[in-house]
Every structure is written in structure tokens, then in C-alpha cells.
Amino acid sequence: MNGSVKRHTPAYPLLLRGLSPLTHLILLALMITSLLPARTRGQDSSNLLAVKAEFVREFSLPGRNNQLLRPAAIHIDRKFNEVLVSDPGHNRIVIFDDNGVYRFEFSGGEVFSTPGDLGVDSEGQIYVVGSTRAGKRLFVFDFDGIYLQELELFTSDGKRVDIGSMTLSEQDELFVYNANQPGITVFSPDGELLREIALFEELSERTLNEMIAGTLTAAQGKLFLPLPSMGMVNLYSFEGEFLQSVGYKGSRVGEMSFPVRAALTPDGLLLVLDKHRHNVLCFDQNYQFIGEFGGRGFNPGWFYHPNLLDVDAGGQIYVGQIFSNRIQVCHLPQVISDRRSPIGGNSD
Amino acid sequence: MRKVLLLTAAFCFVAAGTALAFHDAGVAHCNGCHTMHNSEDGALVDPDSPNGNAWLLRDATASDVCLSCHGDHLGAVFGDDPLAPPSPIGAGNFVYLLEDNLNDGHAGASNPIGGDAAGHNIVAPSRGVAADATLMSSPGGSFPSSSLGCSSCHDPHGNDDFRMLYSAGPIQDGLFNFTNAAPEATGRSIFGGAPGAHTAYQDGMSSWCGNCHGDFHDEANGRLIHPSGSAIGGTIAQTYNLYNGTADITGGAQATAYLEEVPFEDAANTSIMSTEGPSAGSKVMCLTCHRAHASSGPDAGRWDFSVTLLEEDGLESGSYALPDPYGDDDQRSLCNKCHKKDANDHIATP
């Protein structure tokens, strides 16, 4: 059995390596406690930390046969208060206002066959990562969906960037996570290479191979890169300096089992979407855990393997998933936002 | 559910005895997948839908967890665009299950064959795929389609077999019993590989598929009656070796005849880089013609069984055209690799 399990070892035990046998026993004891019947434990102590989502509404399109099919990205343009959704099942981008009212849509047409990540620059131009037979490419549309051009992205050694995920900063810099050679490549809005950020140079090849990166997000001057298989989110400056990691691997309240996406509320709270715990973890401005909301379920306000997340200018939180083609809008629960520390202060 | 958790704990105590095993099979390792069983433990679960709707069977939804890691990464077996699949490793891509039409046969555009026919419909609601709507169980056998998931074929806890495929014994918590051993083969690394690398099949694939399909293509089953798992003999081996495409039926040579699209089993197939064709004792087997996961042709064909010229693939249906290994507009069906009937193609159009 030992030899057999060895062949299937994801990367995260990395964090446990180098601990003494005693520490292991303690960890084990903790883990066993965590396996005690859930209801008894959860009810008293974690009740306030893990709460139900405050469901506001679910997105829907006009017309019965016109619903989203396998939504692949949500991007909220806070400047123009628009919600953009990639809809691969119909190869289109659908635009709503922040009340969820359908505004317009445009198609990938002959340009690409499946849309993915989205971004909007300060002039309203829309950036779409689209899949083509030649691979994932970046395309630009004007603010009402007229196709403008493809941005061909190359690294300094002339290699085409293998787009893992793409995000646009408030300063109109394009950040692309390079899937092939882990790192972030930064471009101007017209595709000119600005700088390259190498990541994870300290990791062994094996660990790198096994590591999975979530979707990169640029927000409020920082880059947030979730590392699902390691159960944490790494923070970098726009220049590429590693700032810190938030969260650690686990499946209990406050822990990350498979974090896939991060987003910031307008007042700077960090939200992290956990695909395997089916919920949203919330951290204050100092990145202290202040609670989590949601959980697995199929009724409104519950999630099933959610993988899309963004927040609008009014602080409404959008959570998307492929199952049932759902995008749900939630409020940050009061008990959680009450727990945030005053700006600049310590957490209570 | 409780049972699983307690067993999990017990296992970890045993494993803790040896430090190395603990590192490799550590606590974190289990909860990489077992949050699906114990998410009540860490996060809330809707009390009104603890097991989801009837569509979400507990066993089957394990696939959603596997796909978090293996969908777009680590082998990328479920890409996000059926028209632009990730480069294949061996088993073929599940993304074709999302196709709306696979029919490239005569008038295929107006007689769609849906993505269900692309191959094995793993039940994976997180990717928008449900059990096969037409095949209720495995043709030729009795495996229930509603329980088909990654862990119907792969042992989620790992084993030493090729691709961690199950050997004889109970699977999926006793839902079904395999009677035949795991196949012997060597595969390319899921982390990448040199161009030209392919699975080297050695033995036992047909009987392994037979765990669920019996001896498919014997007289009792499909439209095609065909041997699987038996030696091809000297004549057919020679045809294979000489065949170098419709345009060059006798110009090939054994040393370079191997075609990834039409593989065969042989104990001598030890290298994933081998270009060598078969000998008389090599065997035709299920994966000579099928992909194990799915393909963009109906019935998980390694090439589209319903076209006359490979060039026609994708034209009627608009689905992904499986690459023609010979790159020739006049190339006919790859059945010809062994039967060289190119002048008078004998493939039935379904």
C-alpha cells in the first residue's frame, strides 16, 4: 500500500516536510479531533465564523432558451458598473448592469471558439482570452463589442506566452500568468512587453510539475495568485516582489482546501473562493481570517464546485459555477464584516 | 459518511508508523480529495440538499474532485474547448462530451450525434456532464452508466498498475466487481514528453475493458464483428508494416511503421518512443480502434469511423478534426493499416 500511494502524491505535503516526529503526532492529534462528528463541533464554536451566504439574486438572461452555458469568467468593471460574463457554451461575452439587468452581448465569431478570462481597461476596451486551434490567445474588443485586434504576447526570449490566466490592473497593465514556464509577464494595453516576473525558482522540478496555479488577480496595487494544491494565496507587488502568503491547507473553518480565485472588496477585504469547500473565505485588510460564508448545496445561496468570483463597486459578491450554469450575487454577511479590524489597527 | 471519516483516521495512525509513508501518503494527501466526503466537517452544507438532486450520486461526483487537478492540468484530460483540445497523451479528452454534433457521415449536419457518443460519460456536474442519456449500462456488460466516474477505472488511492487502473476485485466501494487484471503498458509522463512519445501497450487491455464490456464485437454484440486480444498473424503484420498511407500502400518498413493512431499490443513494446511495427504475435485490442476516455469521433474512435476520407472529419459536424497521421487529402480510414482495402473501402456507415 505504501509504495502504491507514493505514486500519487500531490505537492502540498511539502509544507509538512521537515517537521519533527513530535510535531507530526500533534498534527495528527489535531487532525483526529477535526474528524469528530461535524455537527457538534461546528454548531457552537464555528457558527459565527462559518455562516450561510446572504443570497441576493441569481443571474438570468431574457428568454427561456438563452441561459448561460458553462460560464467561464466573471469580470466586474467597477468604473462603468458593468458585469461581463464569458459564456463558452454560446461562444459569447454577455454584459449586465450591476442590478443584473442584461445589457448586450457579443460573439467570439470567427475569432475564437471559447472565451475565458476577461478584463476592461480605463478606456472601456474589453480584453478576452479566447481559445483557438492554435492555443489560447488574447483579443481586444471596443466598449460595445466590436472586434479590434489580437495582441500577440511574447516573452523577451521570443517565446509565445502560454496564457494560464490574465488580469488587468487599474493602471492598465496586463498581467499574464504563463502556464508553461511559471511566471508572470507584464504587458502594456497594446501588447508591448514591460517586464517579466519569474516565480517559484526555489521549487524543485517535481514540486513545480505537481503544482497547480489558480487565476491571477491584480487589485489595489497587488497581485494575488491562488495556489490550489498548496492551499494558499501568494501576494506579489506589481514589480514582482513576493509579499506574503495567506492561508494554509486544510478542510476546517478558515483553512483552504482548493482556493481557485481571489478578489478584493472596495474597502480592501480579501475574499478567496474555495472550490472544494464550496465557500468564500474572508480576510481583513491585514489578511487575518474573519469568517467564511457559503457551503455545498443546490438551493439559492449554496454553491457546488464554484470557480468564479468578483466583487462590484457596491461590495456585492458574485460567485459562479458550471453546475446549473449559475452566477449568484451575495452580500458580505454582517457578522463577518463586523469582525474586520479598523484600518491600520490590529484585529480584535 | 461517518464510516469513511473514522476509517481515514485509523489509516493515518497506521501510516504514521513509518515516517516516509506518512510524508508521501500524508494527512494533507487524504484531504486533497476527502473534503468531498467530510465537507460537513469544515464548511456548511445546505440542510435541504445534503446529497444534492438525484443526478448527483455520491460515488460519481468524486470525478469533480479529480478534475480540479486533472481537468486543465496534470494530464489535462478535460480541456475547456472541444474545438481546441489540449495535446493528447494517450487516453483522449473528455471535453468532446460537450460537443453538440459528432456526425461526419452522410448528411451528418442534419442528423446530429451528440457528445454523449464521444466516449465514457463520467458524471461530472462541475463540468456540465451527466451520465450517458442513451446507453444505460456498458454495452456487452452491466456497469451502470449513472455511476461511471474516474474512480470506476482508476484507483483513487493509487496502486502500482499502469495509470493506477484497477485490477481484479471490488471497485467503487463494492458497487461492481472486476474479474480481469489491470492491463500492462507504459505511458508517457503526464508532465509532458518528447514529440512522438506514445503509450506502449503490452498486454491485457481487451480483457480489462472486458471487465465492463465482456467480449465486445463478438457475434452477439455490435455491428462490427472483430477479434480483440488475439494475435494478428504474419500476413496482417506485414500489411501494417508496409502500409504507409493510401498513397503508398507498400512503401513502409517495420522499423518505422508504428502509428500512434493504430496501436497494437506486444510484450516487446517497452519503449514509449518506439517506431517499430508489429510482428505476427502482436495483438489487435480495444485501443487499436478506441480511445479509453473519449474522442471527437462517435464511439470514442481513434479516427472517425464514419468518414470515407479522413479529410472529411469535422466537415459535416463542425467538431474537431482528428489529425490525419499521413497528412494526405486522399487518406482513407485507418482500418486499412491492417486491411489495405483502400481502393474498395469496406467500412459501414452507421
Image: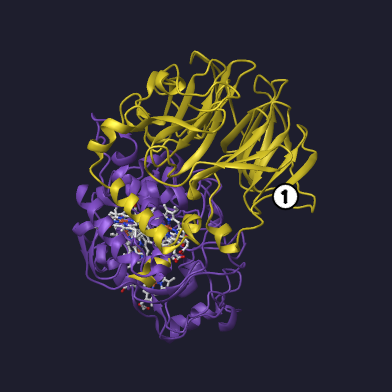
As displayed, is residue B143 above or below residue B208?
above
Q: Residue type at mark 1?
A: Arg
As displayed, is residue B293 above or below residue B199?
above
The residue at the point 26 percent across, 37 percent down is: A41
As displayed, is residue B212 above or below residue B184?
above
Label 1, residues with CA under 10 Å away: few <14, some 14-19, many ≥20: few
For the residue pair B149 and B228, the one nearer the viewer reads as: B149
Rendered location of residue B174, percent (x, y): 19, 59
For the residue pair A262 and B333, the one nearer the viewer reads as: A262
Q: Is residue B12 left or right of residue A207?
A: left
Where, quadrant-wise, is the N terminus of chain A in this rendering? bottom left
Q: Is residue A144 left or right of residue A331?
A: right
Q: Is residue B67 visible?
A: yes
The residue at the point 35 percent across, 24 percent down is: A301
Rendered location of residue B17, percent (x, y): 33, 68
Rendered location of residue B275, percent (x, y): 57, 77
Q: Which chain is purple?
A: B
Q: Which chain is yellow?
A: A
The residue at the point 29 percent across, 66 percent down is: B14
Q: Is residue B217 visible?
A: no
Q: Give me the chain letter of mark 1.
A: A
For the residue pair B230 and B67, the one nearer the viewer reads as: B67
Which residue corresponds to mark 1?
A160
Residue A281: image quadrant is top left
